[in-house]
Image (cartoon, rainbow, N blue to C red):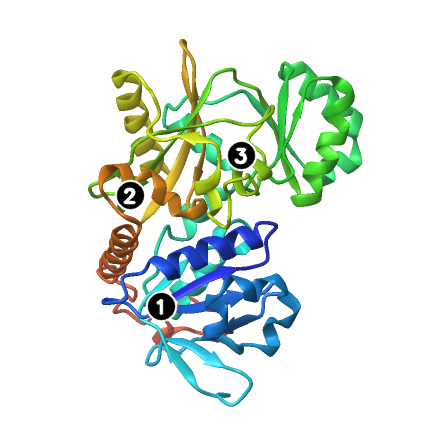
């Protein structure tokens, strides 16, 4: 089984932490974990040294201490082909792929499409759910269609900003009320996110967000408690929910530092953030959040596991986003239910295999060959 992580993403280092967490906690009696590290330039590597966190303190030295590989698109021999060193030309056979990417092409559906072409079972959501889960604008549109409450928002492309900044600033101020959150539409870990309290801060916050994406979303701030929950299962089947957590930002938003660089971090990833697990919630609120989380999960057609983020106050529960590959795989939300990290990983692999078997039930060919009577001259022909 291959655990794949890293990638072309601002969340590259966070992905490395999650990947190593997964490799360390695999049930060694059932699985042989193969690390596959995707460098920031897209090259893929494997090797025993990639199991050690110390290796990643010098990313430039990784090519000298590991084996270059590339995806092997062959239906008979599924896996990765070595492209350099003593093992050049060899194939590393893989039964299941476990993506631990965060952001970028790894979480957006691009790698999921590659895994589909490789015809290898893989953990987590397929292409559609991965892509929509990454795009905060499309996600909100799906939420609205499924009756889920969201914050008021406005979005635009980089080209529109470059063409007429004055128009966009005017429309934001007409449609939304300060304070606002300005975010890259396709990013995570709070990278590029700013809270704007004045008109003067707005332009700069937009410029920051545009560094990380061509599409920006502005959201009205919502005053309340931030509650996250994880959902596990394959859409269309039984879905389980974890306990809820309440997260506490150090300032106006839960920043990258809050999530990954707190005093308790020590490479624990999202498990190190300031939080209360389980959250102290009225039973009816917890049950409602569980219900809304399952609705959102199904709306995006998620698979495997996701973390879904909410906010609530005495008047309303709103949904923020769906994270199809959450930091640290949200293992800390399942432990209070008696599901240890090792068991969680095993269950996710089992769900990947079930998803793959279910996909094989789809017919992928049609028994009529219309090319048999095709006329290249353009005349009509009977088929």
State the residue at coordinates (55%, 31%): 254
Q: Can residue 378 be seen in this view?
A: no
Give the labeled residue for mark 1: 33
Q: In which quarter of the image is residue 317?
A: top left
The local crowd at label 2, few if under 14, some if 14 to 19, many if 20 or more residues have their Cα within 10 Å, is many
For mark 3, give the secondary structure. Answer: helix
- Say which label, 1 or 2, has the lower sequence index: 1
Find residue 315 and report its horizontal and vertical position in percent: 41, 9
Q: How far apart are marks 2 and 3 (CA)?
A: 24 Å
Q: Name above or below for residue 30 compared with residue 128.
A: below
Task: Give the label, 3 or 1, closer to the camera.
Answer: 1
State the residue at coordinates (62%, 65%): 59
For mark 2, give the secondary structure. Answer: strand
The answer to whether mark 3 and mark 1 are in CB contact below 8 A is no
**Along the horizontal axis of the image, is 156 left or right of 235?**
right
Query: Which residue is more in the foreground, 72 or 275?
Result: 275
Q: Distance between the residues labelled 3 and 1?
A: 36 Å
Task: Give the label, 1 or 2, closer to the camera.
Answer: 1
State the residue at coordinates (32%, 66%): 96
**Along the horizontal axis of the image, is 47 left or right of 348?**
right
Give the labeled residue for mark 2: 232
Give the labeled residue for mark 3: 137
Q: Can residue 201 be seen in this view?
A: yes
């Amino acid at each position: 089984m291959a655990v794949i992580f890293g990638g072309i993403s601002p969340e590259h280092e966070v992905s490395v932490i999650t990947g190593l967490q997964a490799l360390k906690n695999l049930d060694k009696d059932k699985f042989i974990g193969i690390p596959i590290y995707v460098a920031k330039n897209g090259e893929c590597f494997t090797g025993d040294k990639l199991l050690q966190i110390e290796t990643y303190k010098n990313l430039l030295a990784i090519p000298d201490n590991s084996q270059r590989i590339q995806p092997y698109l062959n239906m008979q021999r599924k896996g990765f082909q070595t492209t350099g060193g003593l093992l050049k030309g060899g194939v590393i056979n893989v039964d299941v792929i476990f993506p631990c990417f965060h952001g970028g092409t790894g979480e957006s559906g691009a790698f999921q499409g590659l895994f589909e072409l490789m015809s290898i079972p893989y953990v987590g959501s397929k292409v559609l759910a991965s892509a929509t889960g990454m795009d905060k604008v499309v996600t909100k549109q799906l939420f609205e269609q499924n009756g889920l409450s969201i914050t008021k928002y406005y979005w635009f492309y980089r080209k529109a900003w470059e063409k007429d900044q004055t128009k966009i600033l005017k429309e934001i101020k007409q449609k939304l009320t300060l304070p606002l959150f300005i975010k890259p539409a396709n990013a995570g870990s709070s990278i590029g996110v700013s809270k704007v309290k004045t008109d003067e801060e707005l332009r700069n916050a937009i410029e920051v967000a545009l560094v990380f994406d061509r599409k920006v979303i502005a959201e009205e701030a919502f005053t309340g408690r931030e509650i996250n929950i994880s959902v596990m299962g394959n859409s269309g089947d039984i879905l389980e929910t974890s306990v809820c957590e309440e997260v506490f930002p150090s300032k106006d938003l839960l920043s990258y530092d809050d999530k990954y660089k707190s005093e308790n971090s020590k490479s624990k990833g999202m498990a190190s953030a300031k939080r209360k697990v389980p959250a102290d919630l009225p039973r009816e609120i917890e049950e409602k959040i569980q219900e809304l989380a399952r609705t959102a999960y199904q709306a995006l057609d998620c698979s495997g596991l996701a973390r879904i983020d909410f906010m609530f106050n005495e008047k309303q529960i709103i949904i923020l986003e769906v994270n199809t590959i959450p930091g640290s795989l949200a293992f800390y939300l399942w432990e209070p239910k008696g599901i240890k990290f090792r068991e969680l990983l095993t269950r996710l692999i089992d769900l990947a295999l079930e998803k793959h078997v279910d996909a094989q039930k789809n017919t992928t060919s049609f028994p009529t060959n219309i090319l048999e009577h095709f006329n290249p001259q353009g005349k009509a022909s009977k088929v």
